[in-house]
Image (cartoon, grey):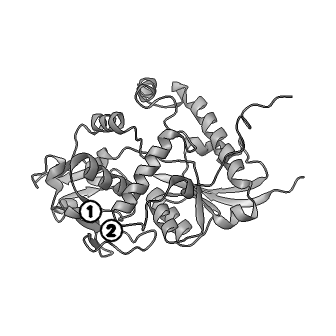
Amino acid sequence: MPKKIPLTLACGDYEITRALKEGAVEPDGIDLTILTDMDSTTRHWRFIRNRDFDMAETSGSSYIVARDHGFAFTALPVFLHRRFRHGFVFINTKKGINKPSDLIGRKIGIKSYLVSAGHWMRGILEHEYGVPHQSIEWFAELDEDIEFTPHPKLKLTRLAHNKSVETMLVDGELDAVIHSSIIKPIMAKDPRVARLWPDFKNEEIAYYKKTGIFPIMHVLGIKQEVIERHPWVPINMFHAFSKAKALAMRRLNNPRIVPLAWYREAWEEQEQVLGPDPWEYGLTDKNRHTLETLAGYSHEQGLTKRKWPVDELFASVFQGRKRGEEFRI
């Protein structure tokens, strides 16, 4: 049996990675151990801080800061998690917050300052709604994936271990929360909490039509020493991820596999708004624009010493023009 190199991959348990996890797609020359039994924040910490895995789905904003600090990682242009974020800005209904500009001067809770969901929303609030990130007092619940020195004008408080931004929002200690998940008070329909944008879906569609950005939350980090030892790994892994996603999309095209009455209509609406492959991998024009925006936010918020060019953040998966897609004999 041909010898394969053993590598570990930590990622979410997604439909677009199912074929890799179940072995329907095998990266050429690689014996892949896939770990999915951990939440995102734990996975990001263990990859960036502990270097536990050879490759990992990790926070895009934390990754850029880690690179700026000289950490020995790079990334593949594989984006396993994207999400619009207008629907994840929650307000206390008794605080008189009716529009984005009402957030100026307020106390806002976040999971941690580098979480990509909050990072994107800070940039969007500043650029699209005129809410400067330095005009807000931020309260972070978790330690950061990587330590950083806040800008002198940044008002950032790390909460005690027994404090929760969700509870503080309900109790009125915070005016708003920007979170990466739907918070429990919203799921419980607590009247003290609401979304800043009740019609967040149409707000997100309008944002996409204006900017062309479907925000990238996570990148696929890989240890630099893996690439130095096996420079062929990035291309082979990129192709494996691409094949797994293609299989997932073909499977999801069948509305019978999803227990939703209007699933097919939602699929067609997504295609109409976002195009045939909004989850595309690679450094395409759209992805470059999105990643340049993310790196720009990192620099202007004082998190990186310079604005990182996209090509410096990602390993090349180029294998020659017109090569690799069709084989001729």
How many neighbours does mark 2 have within 10 angstroms: few (below 14), some (14-19), or many (20 or more)?
A: many
Residue sitting at x 53%, y 47%:
80
Residue 285: image x %, image y %? 50, 40
Residue 313: image x %, image y %? 54, 57
Badge 1 amino acid: Gly
Q: CA distance from mark 1 to mark 2?
A: 8 Å
Picture quarter with the C terminus: top right
Q: Label 2 belongs to which residue?
A: 141
Pointer 1 and pointer 2: residues touching (CB < 8 Å)? yes
Q: Label 1 belongs to which residue?
A: 109
Look at the picture and state if 103 lies above or below 149.
Answer: above
Residue 25: image x %, image y %? 71, 42
Mark 1 vs mark 2: which is more N-terminal?
1
Q: Secondary structure at mark 2?
A: loop
Is residue 32 found left or right of 303 in the rendered image? right
Task: Identify the residue at the far right of this view.
Answer: 1
